[in-house]
Amino acid sequence: MTGRPGDASRVSHRPASARELLDVLGRTAPGLDVETDVGRRAQYAYDASNYRVPPLAVSFPRSAGDVRAVVRACHELGIPVTARGGGTSMAGNAVGPGVVLDFSRHMRRVLDLDPRTRTARVEAGVVLDDLRALAAREGLTFGPDPSSHSRCTLGGMIGNDACGNRSVRHGRTSAHVESLEIVTADGVLAYAERGGLRAADPADDERIAQLEKDLRRLVEENLAPIRTELGRIPRQVSGYQLQHLLPERGFDVPRALVGTEGTCVLVAGATVRLVPQPSATALLVLGYDDVVAAAEDVPEILNWSPTAVEGMDEAIVGTMRARRGPGSVTGLPDGRAWLYVELDDDVGDGGAPDVTAAVAARARDLLGVLRSRGRLVAGRVVESDAERRSLWRVREDGAGLAARLVDGGESWPGWEDAAVEPANLAAYLRDFRALLAAHRLGGVLYGHFGAGCVHVRIDFDWSTDGGRAAARRFLREAARLVTGHGGTLSGEHGDGRARGELLEVMYGRRMLELFAAVKQVFDPVGLLNPGVIVAPAPLDADLALDTPPGARAWPTLTLFPQDSDGFAGAVRRCVGVGRCRSSAGGVMCPSYRATRDERDSTRGRARVLQEMLRGETVTDGWRSREVRDALDLCLSCKACSTDCPTGVDMATYKAEFLHRHYRGRPRPRAHYSLGWLPAAARVATLAAGPVNALLRGPAGRLLARLGGIAPQRRLPAFAPRKSLRAALAATPPGVREPEAVLFIDSFTAAFRPGVAAAISRVLAAAGVPATPQAGLCCGLTWISTGQLAVARRIMARTVARLDGGPHAGLPIVVPEPSCAAALAHDLPRLLGTEAAERVARRVHTLTAALDELASPGWEPPPLPGRVVLQTHCHEYAQFPGHRPRDLLRRLGVREVAEAEGCCGLAGNFGFEAQHYDTSMAVADLALRPKLDEMRDGVVVADGFGCATQVEHLGADRGIAALHLAELLDPGPETQTDTTAERKAGS
């Protein structure tokens, strides 16, 4: 055997500039998408790990030919290459100093799916959920299912040898790979198949044959250590999995390349095996006093052939409930740690007359056995599909929820992937918790307990020299501990930059030399993902929290009370888990779903902001054009504040940035025309008729163009001031003292005063008579355009009125959800007073008011059988325990067809000329399809912007939206004819 540890990566790379790279690619691959701007480099300097490595360039290949062209150019220039899928690596194996190849943007196709052979041929960037959705049509699925399944790619799973929640049944990705389409370090396209390697081009036969010959020689020279040191436990992912190259395993090259983390070859595509979907499953949730007690029962549970045995502790659950409301976690039994156990019909239940009942009966039998063992605090079989979804989401968001807990504490990866034999899990956890205590560290535990794999995020201090030294000492001891229990450093995340240095604790020198020799065969110059596995970088090098000396303070107008260091801590909430890159589920992030560009994801924006705070790549602070451009397509929908597991609130960050960026400078025209809309509306409603006539004519079109408003938009008509007075006069007289304040927001007052009257009647009928409060504003439009000083003045006046007088303690009901969100969320953050806090706590949307305040015996008038619902994003984000969908179902609407996502208008965003196309692309994701499916029923959209978008999309079919109050209005004799027709669904 030749080679020493590190030979392949110690070759000096000739420094090459981005300009040289672009010149070479311009000659050899014209049209290839390669970007080198500061903003793009900032977005790709991070993954979901502790590390920051700004790349030289980022490329977005569209084919294996593009990958080959980039690698050949990099080989010529000596530039390192790092492959990247969803960018969710927690070990630091998706960042690198050279060219980062993002496969996820364009190479995301399923090329073929054969239900007969149960195989699929995919490009490396295909998202797992997209493959599973296609496979499900044939009753099939891909077995491994990481918690990041909504955004992780098959290429990334192959790079790490990912497993997931159901690895007890389906094992690792390597068990499901038939063949790989690869590109070698010198740019040769080839195929890795069981039995060897094959060149795609006959001209490369000799090169590939020599590579295979050298690989076979290394295996023959090292049969004994390969057989004794590798593949000892099911989750042994650390290092290279060379046991698959043994003669008795058929020299299975693709399986050996799985888990090499892009250090040996680049994977451009794969043929993978699929498995049948179960016809029935049962979920058993078990509560324990702690995770050790839970682990003690795992061996017994495995005797029942479960598909999944997942564990987590109480810190994750508490954070979920605090962030998304108490109702976000339902169905958990008593306990401080829990196991999820899933059983299916794959053990002989298929012959039972009722397979579902048979699986559920088996779950109950298991529950009885576990109760008899004495460790279980409580347990139950979860019958409700809604509860199952809620519970699984808690587990799947574990990494993010554990990163920023409800008390504000931060925790980090680094030792988040160790694994032991399941039979040793309890003993390992007991010793591991003692090790944490000895080092005065805290850890949030969760993981795949049925496979012996423990994920833990630890409150390391990576930002100081002392903290880094302490973390290094702990990690060395943790490595010795897990290997002493016969375990592995990494169970599915790979070694990456986090654990490569620790491989010497797990393996002897001969095995490390073999890993280096294998790397040398595939990558003799050491260009592929350097610093990972072979010749690893120090585990405390390139840390994102290792901030440069002299970092400046960042005072802000907005307060961040849950972040100890203000704006910097708030921006640091993004740890890269990437839920914002999901294409379904929740609302975040509408702009990413429309463009599929990392720049337009919540994560991409947060990373550019983090670089701004560092001041190294983004050097001009609040004046940065790169940050401005990254924030440009943020719709300020606020969905990330609830959908992001760590609670990133990009709308608030954007408002603060715009406030600072444009301070003392001219703003975009729409900031004046739309940002000052409430003030303009107060004037316009005094002469609504002439103003509307003006706006409908040529002068109006000219004014719209001068105001930066999209010409495709029809400006909404102002309501005469007397319409609001008439609406308020028509509110039912209270039979007793008012029990709520009806806050007439600017949009309701200016454009749909009838909604105010409808809400007043609904509240009165529900036993909550309300006194109207007009003439106040929440400041929303100034906030969304970053005019925070103006917003504060307006808010201060509003608080002074609402916090005083005879109705100061009453609930405040706001017709417009975005205004309610501004009062509940932005008000205390911008004013920072006790009065603002008191007012914020009183704010309700109509849905929240009916949920919390309505009399028990209240019943609405007859409702239609079907409602198409567009929930306002701000209501979704800021009032998570009060969903209009749930209220409508509870009130008797049989079918609520909810457009699950942003409508695309998003306040001023969709009216701005430069954002119109994105606005409509977002509408195409959810709202337009729901409207296109309409055959009967009504549309409900409480947000004025949502209703405006509905009207814009459905104008040719006469589709318009009702406010929920108009649907529930008990006084049809007071409604306009148009409202009555829409309510009837005609």
Image (spheres, grey):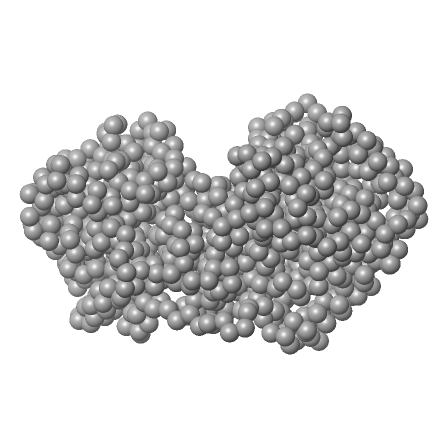
x, y percentage for residue 983?
Answer: 23, 36
x, y percentage for residue 739?
Answer: 22, 62
Q: Is residue 500 visible?
A: no
Q: Residue at x 61, y 60 (%)?
A: 51
Quadrant hosting residue 83:
top right
Q: Residue at x 57, y 32 (%)?
A: 109
x, y percentage for residue 813?
Answer: 25, 57
The answer to which of 566 and 845 lies nearer the viewer is: 566
Query: What is the quadrant of the C terminus in the image?
Result: top left
* 848 sits to left or right of 406: left
The answer to which of 286 and 773 lies nearer the viewer is: 773
Please give the count of numbered marks on the rendered protein: 0
> Relative to 119, does residue 468 appear above or below in the rendering?
below
Q: Is residue 26 visible?
A: yes
Q: Residue at x 13, y 54 (%)?
A: 682
Quadrant hosting residue 699:
top left
Q: Residue at x 22, y 34 (%)?
A: 982
x, y percentage for residue 568?
Answer: 46, 67
* 249 sits to left or right of 903: right
* 668 sits to left or right of 49: left
Quadrant hosting residue 324:
bottom left
Q: Residue furthest top?
A: 116
The answer to which of 672 and 360 lies nearer the viewer is: 672
> Relative to 240, does residue 550 appear above or below in the rendering?
below
> Relative to 486, does residue 18 appear above or below in the rendering?
above
The answer to which of 236 and 912 lies nearer the viewer is: 912
